[in-house]
Amino acid sequence: MSMHSPITFRPHHFLCTLGFQGMGYSPVFVDNFKNVIDALTSGALIQVTFGIDSICKPCPNQNGTVCNKQSFIETLDARHAKALQLKNGDTLTWADALIRIRTHISIDTFHTLCEGCPWKDGGMCESALQKERD
Ligand code: SF4
């Protein structure tokens, strides 16, 4: 990841990043995700987008300008944008994002926001959120 390319996140990827435990859709997807997290922990800025972002880019579900699960993903993004008060084009650091997550996302809220996501039942997102809130 070049330090010069801005990191972009669609709204639901803030929680995905919190819960990331090295699993994902493909090896290249996972490697990219790790690189994004490295950049974030080095203080890189995140720009909010409502489309294909820095996490989606190498994803096997990415189909040009949309996700293969586009309608569900739009639902997820709308829920997370509302909860985290994110608007298209907003910029924030990962440290800022963690404050928003702690402030706005209880465990109950998480279960509502992430309802329907196939990763939720694995429990890693809930435990990461619990740890962040402790
Ligand atoms: S599944 Fe869709 S929203 Fe999720 S990373 Fe892949 S392309 Fe992006």
Image (tube, rainbow, N blue to C red):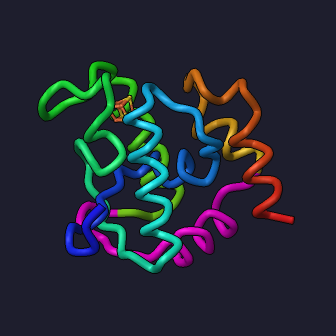
> Toward which corner of the image does residue 67 lie, by quadrant?
top left
Vertical placement of residue 88 versus 21, above or below: below
Between 49 and 32, which is closer to the camera in this rendering? Answer: 32
Determine the residue positioned at 12% across, 30% down.
Answer: 64
**Residue 39 lies in magenta, yes or no?**
no
- Quarter of the picture containing the N terminus is bottom left
Q: Residue at x 52, y 77 (%)?
A: 96
Residue 15 horizontal/vertical position (percent) = 56, 50
Residue 4, quarter of picture: bottom left
In this rendering, position of residue 92 left or right of residue 67: right
Q: Which quarter of the frame holds ligand 1?
A: top left
Segment tinted magenta in the rendering: 87-106
Residue 68 rendering spot, x and y as whole percentages: 28, 19
Task: Work out which residue is located at the far right of the displayed protein and give it.
Answer: 134
Residue 35 place in picture, x, y as percent: 42, 56
Quarter-of-image position of residue 20: top right
Image location of residue 112, percent across then percent down: 64, 36
- Picture quarter with the C terminus: bottom right
Closer to the camera, 115 or 55?
55
